[in-house]
Amino acid sequence: MKQQKIMEQQEPITLDDRIKQDLTELYNILHKSVPLKAIKGVGGISAAVELSEKLYSGDNKHKDDDAYALSTLGLPGYFTGNRDAKTVMVMLNPGISAMENDNPLRTMKSIKDLEIDFDKGVDEFINSYIEKNSKYGEHKSYKVDAFDLKQAVFLSAWENTGIDPTDGFPQKLIDNSGKHNNAAVKAEIKSLKEKATRKVLTQKLQLELIPYASRKFDTDNANLEVLMPYLETLLHEIFKADCKYIIFCSNFFERLFKAYSKEENKCFEIEFDIKKPASERESDDVHCTLVNITYNNQTKPAIIAHTFSNQSLTNAYEKMQKYGKQCYKNLKPYLSKENQ
């Protein structure tokens, strides 16, 4: 892949800017509304309201479908983990029902569970949110989530990710999948899952393209134009740190990158190295796309893992490990020598 010349760049909205703007609004709303069960006459976080109105505006396909509604009053999920991590995984958005997430009582419970400071002023609220999300997997209230476990299995074959290995993981999960095990084996597997997910949540960085929760995300009908500023925010955050692996976890990002590459005033240059058509692939090829991303004269390779978001792979530990291993094999030749 050849490096392309960068045009004059515009500064994107940073992740910290988005967090400050959105959480300041949310803080003010919650202070006025708690302990009400519903908020009447309040629009919510303005950025979330605007995005919710425009995300599927092309044909109003999901205008009255609550499953696709974005949360405008709940606690957003911008990131979890170490913002200086070697490994970055980028998702679409938090998969939580907006109707549930918009209940102020639920939002306050999330704030309490995460031990976020809410009664010491808006600045402490924001700072505490950032700190607690950086250590999300360490919270006593955290319970193993199948999606978090999926990330740990996917990355288990990657080298030097910055994530401490967990002995026996994920092989013991693979070996005992679907079996009726005794209490000792079940306890061991439960412990392995917890240790692996806590590490992957804390020692890597997970970013969300859209920080506002929805139960479903329609990748076929989303308005790509309104997502461009959010993509720029993510890429700015990624290039702030000296990360080694960049993984975009849905084939939707390929469409988004292709659309972004046609923008006139953009912050980044994106160059594609598309994998062969399925009919021409070698046996060890997988559904993924390699890209070069260039910003401020710095170029980093990244991989788009097309089928990572496939829900059927959540508990398919062997398939997910194999998929991660093959994605790593495809990306490794493009890494700089010091990163191999």
Image: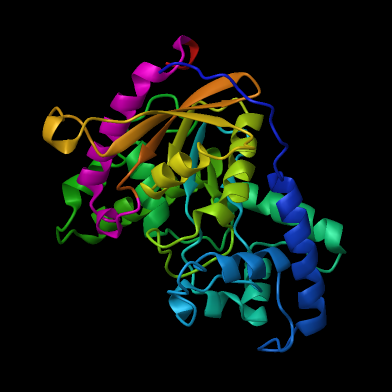
Q: Does the magenta stretch include residue 324?
A: yes
Q: In this view, does 190 lie to the left or right of 312?
A: right
* Image point (13%, 30%), residue name: 280
As rendered, which of 164 and 131 lies closer to the eye? 131
The answer to whether any part of residue 135 appears in the image is: no
Magenta: main secondary structure: helix
Up the image or down, 163 lies above or below 220; here it is above
As rendered, which of 264 and 183 lies closer to the eye? 264
Q: In this view, does 234 lie to the left or right of 47?
A: left
- The residues colored magenta run 309-337
As rendered, which of 31 and 153 lies closer to the eye? 31
Residue 322 point in image, percent of width and height? 23, 37
Up the image or down, 111 lies above or below 139; here it is below
Q: Is residue 238 magenta?
A: no
* Image point (27%, 30%), residue name: 275
Quarter of the figure with the N terminus: top left
Quarter of the figure with the C terminus: top left
